[in-house]
């Protein structure tokens, strides 16, 4: 009877105690979250209840398994398996706690600093730091798991002795990967490009959506995703429209007839911008910037607070100005001139073209 009750008491007690402690901890975190709704830390910590319960259960079973008198022939294997579960769940819990602390710190920083550019920079650094921390924790946990096997402990000296050679071989073999990783760290702390920045790369305009240690994803205006190595941004020039200040100046061009009413167009541009919510009111102007034998080129400069609004202002001005010219000044639109040429005084068509000749 003792051989049956002892394992049930040990195993059942460990599971019940784990559930009780996990429920009590979750209850305390929930109350703390209700008392401090402005701090997301407690709610984020609740997401780690599964690895937390795994750590508790594995630790209790590892400590009480010797008293259960269960599977004595496989005592070493079961103990090692529990140790592996304990190390893995502990690494999982550490990553969840670190993510909760980092996310809370970022949220507080974002609330305290209204500058969107600085917030995006910190967000980029935070995400890359979390990836580095997660990688370090995983590597340490994996090494700890391997060291639980006697064969791996015996081979430790030889592994350390060959670490230099292996490092050189790995560095040569993974040269491009390592360069991308260092480029990712350079981007994170060099403030070259941040998540949410508006960039132009290879002629494509879009917003930086994701930055990792090896690649960067740009979401274009038509919802496509361009994935490129981060080393591209450290070795080639690119446009970052969000660098410094997001305010932008845009241009709108028209090719019109020489008789276009330029002064009336300036007044119409002012009226269009006053009715456009995307215009920030900083500046505008309209000038003739070029002339050809058939048309003139008219350029309007407009301003907006960011790249999205400058696009809206440009298309609005272009559309409404063409509509107004078509309705009020149709003569200003480009046309093919089919009228007879006006000759200089003293010349006639016959003197210019010469006498008419007819075949015999």
Image (spheres, rainbow, N blue to C red):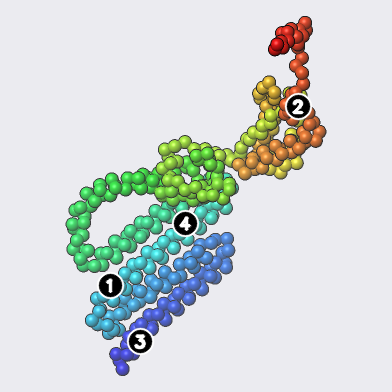
Question: Of tags 4 and 2, which is closer to the observer?
Answer: 2
* Residue at screen point 32% across, 60% down: 140
Question: Of tags 4 and 3, which is closer to the observer?
Answer: 3
Which class describes the residues within 10 Å of circle 3: few (<14), some (14-19), or many (20+)? some
The number of callouts visible is 4
- Res 332 → quadrant: top right
Q: What is the CA distance from the residue labelled 4 to the residue labelled 3?
A: 41 Å
* Residue at screen point 34% across, 77% down: 61
Q: Position of residue 59 (x, y in %)?
A: 35, 74
Query: Is 44 positioned to the left or the right of 354 in the image?
Result: left
Q: Name the secondary structure under disc 3.
A: helix
Q: Earlier in the sequence, mark 4 or mark 2?
A: 4
Are discs 3 and 2 less than 8 Å apart at CB?
Answer: no
Q: Earlier in the sequence, mark 4 or mark 3?
A: 3
Which class describes the residues within 10 Å of circle 2: few (<14), some (14-19), or many (20+)? many
Q: What residue does disc 1 label?
A: 80
| Circle on res. 8 | 3
Q: Earlier in the sequence, mark 1 or mark 3?
A: 3
Question: Of tags 3 and 2, which is closer to the observer?
Answer: 2
Q: What is the CA distance from the residue labelled 3 to the residue labelled 2?
A: 95 Å
Q: What is the CA distance from the residue labelled 1 to the residue labelled 3?
A: 21 Å
Q: What residue does disc 2 label?
A: 260
Q: Name the secondary structure under disc 1.
A: helix
Placement of 330 over or under 83, stated as above or below: above
* Residue at screen point 31% across, 62% down: 142
Q: What residue does disc 4 label?
A: 102
Q: Name the secondary structure under disc 4.
A: helix
């Amino acid at each position: 009877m003792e051989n049956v009750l002892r394992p049930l008491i040990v195993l059942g007690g460990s599971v019940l105690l784990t559930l009780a402690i996990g429920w009590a901890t979750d209850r305390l975190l929930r109350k703390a979250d209700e008392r401090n709704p402005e701090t997301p830390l407690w709610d984020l910590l609740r997401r780690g209840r599964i690895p937390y319960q795994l750590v508790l259960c594995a630790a209790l079973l590892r400590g009480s398994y010797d008293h259960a008198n269960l599977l004595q022939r496989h005592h070493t294997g079961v103990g090692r398996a529990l140790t592996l579960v304990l190390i893995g769940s502990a690494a999982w819990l550490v990553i969840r706690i670190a993510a909760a602390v980092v996310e809370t710190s970022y949220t507080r920083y974002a609330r305290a600093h209204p500058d969107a550019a600085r917030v995006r920079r910190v967000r980029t650094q935070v995400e890359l730091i979390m990836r580095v921390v997660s990688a370090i924790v995983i590597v340490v946990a994996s090494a700890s798991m391997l060291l639980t096997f006697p064969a791996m402990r015996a081979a430790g000296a030889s592994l350390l002795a060959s670490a230099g050679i292996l490092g050189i071989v790995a560095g040569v073999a993974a040269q491009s990967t390592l360069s991308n990783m260092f480029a990712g760290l350079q981007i994170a702390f060099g403030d070259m490009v941040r998540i949410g920045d508006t960039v132009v790369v290879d002629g494509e305009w879009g917003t930086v959506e994701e930055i990792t240690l090896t690649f960067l994803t740009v979401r274009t205006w038509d919802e496509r995703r361009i994935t490129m190595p981060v080393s591209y941004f450290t070795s080639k020039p690119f446009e970052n429209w969000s660098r410094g200040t997001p305010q932008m100046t845009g241009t709108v061009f028209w090719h019109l007839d020489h008789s276009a009413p330029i002064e009336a167009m300036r007044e119409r541009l002012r009226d269009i911008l006053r009715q456009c919510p995307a215009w920030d009111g900083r500046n505008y102007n309209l000038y003739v910037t070029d002339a050809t034998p058939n048309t003139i080129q008219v350029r309007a400069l407009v301003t907006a607070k960011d790249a999205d609004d400058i696009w809206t202002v440009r298309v609005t001005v272009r559309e409404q100005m063409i509509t107004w010219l078509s309705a009020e000044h149709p003569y200003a639109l480009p046309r093919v001139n089919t009228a007879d040429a006006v000759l200089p005084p003293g010349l006639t068509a016959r003197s210019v073209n010469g006498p008419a000749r007819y075949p015999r």
